[in-house]
Image (spheres, grey):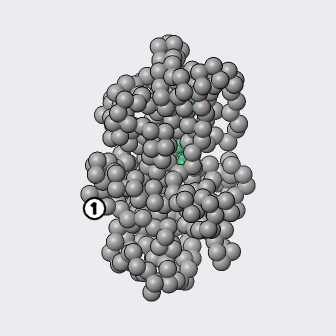
């Protein structure tokens, strides 16, 4: 057992504080990873504050993990000490259901094990990446290609794959008009990825404050959703809209921006229900869909795609003592475009 430094939430209403957690001994199929950087996802805040259901405390959040392998189990074949690796939102699944066999462990029918707040094989609660080390079975570890710095790679493990997967599934590419709602952690990755896939990309942000950034990240167009004229001007335009917003939106207004047969896919996960008028869908054959992260194989594919296209996340690296301040800034939409914890500051 290894005792490691970490930062944890101890209650829904308390700030995160320094702590230690135990990591299991390295089993035959495990790798021990020295975490270098961990991204702060909006989901960390929702979990830490029990917004999606009561959490077991204390909880160490963090599922955008990038680091270096420092020990491997006797049976580990795919990784060696010194390898640059990542871990995302899952650390285990049943491996035998229809979803797992398809490589879609995120939809494991028996329920996968989340990187934090999940129940591990030994019955303990998993603890995440706001810590210095983690032990993970090799099948849930991915390789970070040379050419992507580890701090810029960390957010790819959630924000990257969560946007890459629906962009691929709904065919973002040349000749396709793709809109991204919300230019935060997921949104800025969606813009970079959709642009690299060859789509015509539009950002739909609350205001024009971040327009220069949006265009630099690869958007062709940028519109403020705070301006009602946007919804008239862009009516019936998009083949695909990716909604990354963490709050409730007027879905009918956004569905009206879809072309015939277009799809609006929700990756944003507000705690409260969203409602819609079915006529927003049926009169134009539109679809409304959801998508959860991506499988392990697709996560590796995404990392390789990012390396090939020179894509990382745009990050603001912070020391651990700024985690609570970063949470407040994320909640205020004041993130450009992902906070990443330098885990060397945890000790
Ligand atoms: P984030 O960095 O906070 O970005 C969300 C963006 O949404 C903000 O930057 C803001 O963009 C916009 N926004 C925020 N509040 C809004 C409001 N009231 N009305 C309109 N727009 C608003 O969060 P994130 O880390 O990207 O995560 C986004 C959501 O995806 C969260 O709900 C998270 O839990 C969820 N998530 C889902 C998955 C999945 O697998 N489906 C994976 C990871 C995260 P502008 O300033 O540009 O308007
Ligand atoms: Zn996440
Ligand atoms: Zn399964």
Q: Residue at x 55, y 32 (%)?
A: 264
Q: Secondary structure at mark 1?
A: loop
Position of 286 relative to 170 (above/below): above
Q: Quarter holding the N terminus?
A: bottom right
Position of 270 relative to 2 (above/below): above
Q: Nearer the viewer, residue 148 or 318?
A: 148
Residue 307, position in %: x, y? 30, 54
Q: Quadrant of residue 66?
A: bottom left
Position of 172 relative to 278 (above/below): below
Residue 344, position in %: x, y? 39, 66
Q: Nearer the viewer, residue 112 or 108?
A: 108
* In the image, the residue with mark 1 has its CB under 8 Å from the nearest atom of ligand 2: no
- Horizontal side of residue 200 vs 92, given as left or right: left
Q: Residue at x 27, y 61 (%)?
A: 146
Residue 32, position in %: x, y? 45, 76
Q: Quick one: which residue is furthest to the bottom in this view? A: 74
Q: Can the viewer see residue 206 in this picture?
A: yes
Q: Quarter holding the C terminus?
A: bottom left
Question: Which residue in the structure is indicated by mark 1?
Answer: 146
Q: Residues within 10 Å of mark 1 (few under 14, many from 20)?
A: few
Residue 94, position in %: x, y? 62, 68
Q: Residue at x 40, y 79 (%)?
A: 77
Q: Residue at x 44, y 39 (%)?
A: 171
Q: Nearer the viewer, residue 181 or 21?
A: 181
Q: Nearer the viewer, residue 312 or 133?
A: 312
- Horizontal side of residue 133 vs 281, given as left or right: left
- Horizontal side of residue 314 vs 22, given as left or right: left
């Amino acid at each position: 057992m290894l005792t490691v430094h970490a930062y944890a939430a101890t209650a829904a209403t308390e700030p995160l504080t320094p702590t230690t957690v135990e990591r299991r001994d390295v089993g035959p199929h495990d790798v021990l990873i020295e975490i270098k950087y961990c991204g702060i996802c909006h989901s960390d805040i929702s979990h830490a504050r029990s917004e999606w259901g009561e959490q077991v405390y204390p909880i160490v959040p963090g599922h955008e993990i990038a680091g270096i392998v420092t020990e491997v189990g006797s049976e580990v074949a795919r990784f060696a000490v010194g390898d640059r690796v990542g871990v995302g939102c899952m650390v285990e699944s049943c491996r035998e259901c229809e979803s797992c066999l398809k490589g879609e462990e995120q939809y494991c029918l028996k329920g996968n094990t989340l990187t934090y707040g999940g129940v591990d094989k030994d019955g303990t609660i998993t603890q995440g990446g706001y810590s210095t080390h983690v032990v993970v079975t090799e099948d849930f570890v991915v390789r970070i290609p040379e050419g992507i710095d580890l701090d810029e790679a960390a957010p790819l493990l959630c924000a990257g794959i969560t946007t890459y997967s629906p962009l691929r599934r709904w065919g973002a590419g040349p000749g396709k008009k793709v809109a991204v709602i919300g230019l935060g952690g997921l949104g800025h990755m969606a813009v970079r990825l959709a642009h690299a896939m060859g789509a015509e990309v539009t950002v739909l942000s609350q205001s024009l404050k971040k327009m220069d950034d949006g265009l630099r990240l690869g958007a062709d167009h940028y519109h403020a959703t705070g301006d009602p004229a946007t919804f008239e001007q862009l009516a019936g335009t998009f083949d695909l809209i990716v909604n990354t917003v963490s709050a409730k939106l007027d879905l009918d207004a956004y569905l009206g921006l879809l072309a015939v047969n277009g799809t609006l896919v929700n990756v944003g996960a507000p705690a409260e229900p969203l409602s819609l008028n079915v006529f927003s869908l049926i009169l134009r054959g539109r679809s409304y869909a959801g998508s959860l992260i991506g499988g392990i194989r697709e996560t590796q594919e995404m990392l390789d795609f990012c390396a090939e296209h020179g894509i990382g996340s745009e990050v603001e690296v912070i020391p651990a003592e700024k985690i609570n301040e970063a949470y407040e800034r994320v909640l205020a939409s004041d993130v450009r475009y992902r906070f990443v914890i330098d885990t060397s500051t945890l000790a």
